[in-house]
Every structure is written in C-alpha cells, then in structure tokens.
Amino acid sequence: MRQVTNVKLPDALRLSGLLGELQYIEFARSCRPDKAFTPHLA
C-alpha cells in the first residue's frame, strides 16, 4: 500500500484506515503470539 503525502484524505477515511491497520496488527499478534511475527509498518 502506497501513501501519497501530498494528497489530503478526509479525516474519517484516514482514521478508519489507521484503526483497520491497528486491528489487523492486534489480530495477527493474538493469532501468532510468538516473537517470530513482526508487523511491517511503513
């Protein structure tokens, strides 16, 4: 996923994207509690 910094996204869209990413990380951590899993944050 590429993020273009010079394009202004609506706050709701940006916030939902951030929350979705956080939920994905939490879900992945709960499924794989081992330290082998490292989320790739851009």
Image (tube, helix red, strand yellow):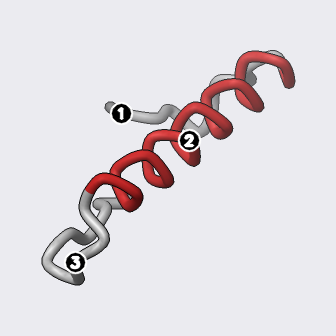
The residue drawn where x is 30% and y is 53% is 31
The x and y percentages for residue 32 are 25, 62
Q: Earlier in the sequence, mark 2 or mark 1?
A: 1
Q: Nearer the viewer, mark 2 or mark 3?
A: 3
What's the amino acid at mark 2? Gln
- Residue at the far left: name it: 36
Q: Residue furthest bottom?
A: 35
Residue labelled with disc 2 = 23
**Is 4 above or below relative to 7?**
below
Foreground residue, 8 or 34?
34
- Is residue 27 rendered to the left or right of residue 9? left
The answer to whether the residues at label 3 and label 1 have Cβ atoms under 8 Å apart is no
Question: Disc 3 versus disc 1: distance between alpha carbons?
Answer: 28 Å
Q: Which residue is mark 3?
A: 34
Q: Dot 2 surroundings within 10 Å: few (below 14), some, or many (20 or more)?
A: few
Q: Position of residue 26 (x, y in %)?
A: 50, 53
- Say if 21 sits above or below 32 in the image: above
In the rendered image, the quadrant that contains the C terminus is bottom left
Query: Which label lies toward us, 2 or 1?
Result: 2
Picture quarter with the N terminus: top left
Cβ–Cβ below 8 Å for labels 2 and 3? no
Residue 36 in the image: state x and y as whole percent: 13, 78
Q: Which residue is mark 1?
A: 2
Identify the secondary structure beneath mark 1: loop
- Which quarter of the picture shows residue 16? top right
Q: Are marks 2 and 1 in contact (CB under 8 Å)?
A: no
Q: Secondary structure at mark 2?
A: helix
Kind of residue at disc 3: Asp
Mark 3 crowdedness (10 Å alpha carbons): few <14, some 14-19, many ≥20: few
